[in-house]
Amino acid sequence: MLDMNNILKQAQKMQEEMKKVQDSLASVTVEGSAGGGMVKVIANCKLEILSIKIEPDILKEEDQEMIEDLLVAAVNQAIQNAQKRAEEEMKKVTGGLLGNLNLPDGFKFPGL
């Protein structure tokens, strides 16, 4: 027999733990890079870009379009890395429970 009180308490505890993880994601950083590391982007797992580093050598080439393309690639990679890391952190709290819900690929909970 299921104890609804116990289930509700567990759900509330999981919700509190998920909130803690979400709050801590701002301090977890990931890197995205492009052009063999010529452009590097550091982001946190809240999907905020913290810094962009460009190797001086590519600035001398005066190829604005290439630099723009590398920036886009590095930012996108950083965001993908941040999303993956955030999912990993949330799985630690949920014990993979959310993965058993058969949610569609790419589904994101609000705030993640």
Image: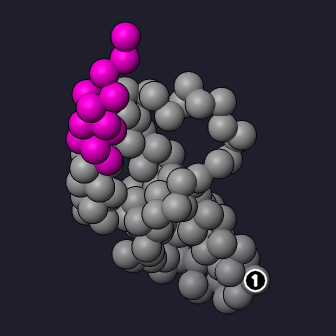
Magenta part of the chain: 1-15
Tell me: residue 33, above or below residue 87.
below
Residue farthest to the right, as pictured: 65
Please give the residue where the numbered disc 1 appears in the rendered image. Answer: 65
Res. 32 visible in picture? no
The residue nearer to you, when weighing 19 against 5, is: 5
Residue 66: quarter of image: bottom right
Number of numbered discs visible in the structure rendering: 1
User: Residue 54, image x and y in percent?
Assistant: 49, 76
Give the side of residue 56 with respect to residue 65, left or right: left
What amino acid does circle 1 point to?
A: Glu
The residue nearer to you, when weighing 108 against 78, is: 108
Residue at the image position 62 percent from the left and 63 percent from the top: 76
Is residue 56 on the magenta stretch?
no
The residue nearer to you, when weighing 17 against 59, is: 17
Res. 82 visible in picture? yes
Give the side of residue 29 with respect to residue 82, left or right: left
User: Residue 21, image x and y in percent?
Assistant: 28, 51
Give the side of residue 15 with respect to residue 99, left or right: left
Residue at the image position 59 percent from the left and 31 percent from the top: 101
Residue at the image position 45 percent from the left and 28 percent from the top: 97
Dominant SS in magenta? helix
Residue at the image position 66 percent from the left and 72 percent from the top: 72
User: Residue 108, image x and y in percent?
Assistant: 58, 52
The residue nearer to you, when weighing 81 against 74, is: 81
**Does dot 1 land on a helix, a strand or a loop?**
helix
